[in-house]
Amino acid sequence: MTSEEILEWYEKACAFHTKRAPGLAIGIAMVDMCRARLGPVKEKLNAISESPACLCDVIQLMTGCTMGNRYVKSYGEIGRFALTLYDRADGRGVRAYIDLDKISASKTPELHKFFLRQRSEAVKAGGEERLKSGDLVVKEFLAVRDQIIALQDVFIEKFGKSEMLPAALCKSCHESFLCHNKAEECASCSGKLKYYRPVNG
């Protein structure tokens, strides 16, 4: 993929992501390189993102692997700027990550600061300074992308079609939920995953 093609995809990704983020451009190049190395798949292309940020959106936009069709998984708790594309039929995959040892603090200073989260306070505050920094990160990245993206052939530990969980009726809230291990309550009522509280009651 040429730099011009990456920038075209970047504009689409920014619209999908609803803001300009340099990680999108970097992720586009990573997805492209993984696909090229992986080659044709026997069944369905699946994906894993190790970051909770930009990579999930790039994967969904470029591959058709989405959270909704369950072809992409996010392991955001790992927190690395890395992704893997793999064949669901046999678990054969390619992982792309950023080789920080190849990023020069003197030749590509903004890119270096981006990956270490050391950009200025003005940039972190947002607004015009953040946009300028983002544009510079993308520019610096395009100049060195082939040197800093590392590819790793991998085999996925658990591959194949995702299990279709049965539905059950929660004994507390009486809502239908996807049942893990014959649970009688949904994760919210059991306290395993409580993300809201009712306004009234």
Image (spheres, rainbow, N blue to C red):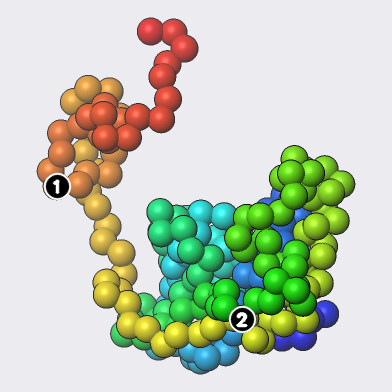
> Which of pointers 1 and 2 indicates the residue nearer the eye?
2
Residue 196 got which mark? none
The percent position of residue 161, horizontal first and vertical second, equals: 31, 70
Residue 123's place in the image compared with 159, above or below, is above
Q: Residue at x 69, y 81 (%)?
A: 145
Asked if residue 58 lies left or right of residue 48, the reply is right
- Sequence-first tag of 1 and 2: 2
* Residue placed under numbered mark 2 in the picture: 102
The quarter holding residue 160 reads: bottom left
Q: Quadrant of the C terminus?
A: top left
Whether residue 55 is visible, yes or no, is yes
Q: Which residue is drawn at 62% across and 55% down?
A: 117
Q: Residue at x 81, y 72 (%)?
A: 139
Element class at badge 1: loop
Which residue is the extreme one toward the left? 182
Neighbourhood count class around disc 2 (C-alpha, 10 Å): few under 14, some 14–19, many 20 upward: few
Residue 155's place in the image compared with 138, above or below, is below
* Residue placed under numbered mark 1 in the picture: 181
The percent position of residue 163, horizontal first and vertical second, equals: 26, 61
Residue 59's place in the image compared with 178, above or below, is below
Q: How far apart are marks 1 and 2 (CA)?
A: 46 Å
